[in-house]
Image (spheres, helix red, strand yellow):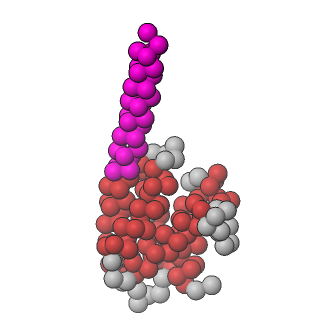
Amino acid sequence: MKPREEIVEKWIARMTEFHPEQSAALRAPEPDPFRNPVAYTVRKSLAELWEQLCGDMDPDAIDSALDAVIRIRAVQDISPREATGFVVQLQPLLSQLPAEVDRTLLEARINRLALTALEKYKECRKQIAALRVHEVERLTHGHGTARKARA
């Protein structure tokens, strides 16, 4: 296994430590995008985030990968800290990197990514709340119309 893959696998393992019910799904060796879309998306996204943290920090690539994971986490019944904490769970793994890697730079990037994750989570939860309100209004309005038609 390559060092990049090892870090991503350990990152996934740390992510699932706090949610054992997700462990089996996320630890599938080669998740199928159709049979296990959550595991596939999380693995693909974390690999991309790790590449970006170690590379150019392309804002579009980071946004896309982070958005995919945060959307999954935003619909789960977990706290904001739990939903976005997977980002900082990467920091302890930095000690396993070769000495020539600039860990200080990676830590700073991880911290920025964690703040971005929290902002994305907040946006997603706001969207979910708006969808719920819209659905309640639609159902309420639909029932009100039906009652008036019967009267």
Nearest to the observer: residue 96 or residue 83: 83
Q: Residue at 55%, 84% (x, y): give it.
A: 3
Residue 87: image x %, image y %? 43, 63
Q: Nearer the viewer, residue 8 or 105?
A: 8
Q: Which residue is found at the position 47% from the left and 87% from the top?
A: 98
Quarter of the image where one finds residue 34: bottom right
Query: Residue at (33%, 77%) from the top-left corner?
Result: 58
- Is residue 140 at all visible to an observer of this figure? no
148 falls in the magenta region: yes
Q: Position of residue 8 (x, y in %)?
A: 54, 74
Residue 64 sits above or below residue 129 on the image? below
Determine the residue positioned at 33% across, 82% down. Answer: 56
Residue 84 colored in magenta in the image: no
Q: Position of residue 122 (x, y in %)?
A: 34, 49
Q: In this picture, which residue range is highlighted in magenta?
A: 122-151
Quadrant of the image occupied by residue 51: bottom left
* Horizontal arrangement in the rendering, residue 144 relative to residue 77 (left or right): left
Q: Position of residue 147 (x, y in %)?
A: 44, 15
Q: Quadrant of the N terminus?
A: bottom right
Residue lying farthest bottom?
A: 100
Image height of 81 relative to 134, above or below: below
Q: Report the number of numbered marks.
A: 0
Q: Residue furthest top?
A: 151
79 w.r.t. 5: above or below: above
**Quadrant in which the C terminus appears:** top left
